[in-house]
């Protein structure tokens, strides 16, 4: 009595949709930061480095990436 592997794991449509959404959110954030490059470029170099460093990290908390990853795995927006 063997288990048919085709029925054991059904691929989910949520993963490709979630991956495309993540790529779109990253592109949107990159365009937003790049659009601010003029005012940021007018700042001294010692201020520009932390601004770009923080903007490169803060999108993880501002964009709903954690919830999106949970949704891709479970189909729910929150764990639990």
Image: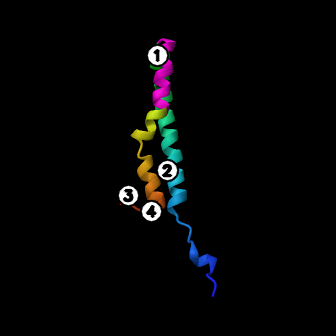
Q: Residue at x 55, y 58 (%)?
A: 16
Q: Relative to 45, is 21 above or below?
A: below
Q: CA distance from mark 2 to mark 4?
A: 16 Å
Overall secondary structure of the magenta section:
helix
Earlier sequence position, callout 2 versus callout 3? 2
Q: Relative to 27, is 47 above or below?
A: above
Q: Which residue is mark 3?
A: 79
Q: Considering the numbered disc 3 on the image, is that residue within a helix, a strand or a loop?
A: loop
Q: Position of residue 65 (x, y in %)?
A: 45, 47
Q: Quadrant of the C terminus?
A: bottom left
Q: Residue at x 61, y 81 (%)?
A: 3
Q: Circle 2: is it few (<14), some (14-19), or many (20+) Cα within 10 Å?
A: some
Earlier sequence position, callout 3 versus callout 1? 1
Q: Relative to 43, is 24 above or below?
A: below
Earlier sequence position, callout 2 versus callout 1? 2
Earlier sequence position, callout 3 versus callout 4? 4
Q: CA distance from mark 2 to mark 1?
A: 32 Å
Q: Quadrant of the N terminus?
A: bottom right
Q: Which residue is mark 1?
A: 47
Q: Circle 1: is it few (<14), some (14-19), or many (20+) Cα within 10 Å?
A: few
Q: Place residue 76 in its image quadrant.
A: bottom left
Q: CA distance from mark 3 to mark 1?
A: 38 Å
Q: Are marks 3 and 4 in contact (CB under 8 Å)?
A: yes
Question: What number is the disc on residue 21?
Answer: 2
Kindly give the residue lying farthest to the front in the view shown. 1
Q: Considering the numbered disc 1 on the image, is that residue within a helix, a strand or a loop?
A: helix
Kindly give the residue lying farthest to the bottom in the view shown. 1
Q: Does residue 74 belong to the magenta stretch?
A: no
Q: Position of residue 52 (x, y in %)?
A: 49, 25
Q: Which residues are magenta?
A: 44-56
Q: Considering the numbered disc 4 on the image, is that residue within a helix, a strand or a loop?
A: helix
Q: CA distance from mark 4 to mark 1?
A: 41 Å
């Amino acid at each position: 009595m063997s288990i048919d592997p085709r029925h054991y794991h059904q691929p989910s449509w949520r993963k490709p949709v979630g991956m495309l959404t993540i790529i779109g959110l990253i592109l949107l954030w990159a365009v937003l930061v790049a659009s601010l490059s003029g005012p940021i470029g007018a700042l001294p170099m010692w201020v520009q480095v932390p601004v770009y460093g923080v903007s490169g990290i803060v999108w993880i908390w501002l964009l709903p990436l954690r919830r999106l990853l949970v949704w891709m795995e479970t189909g729910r927006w929150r764990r639990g």
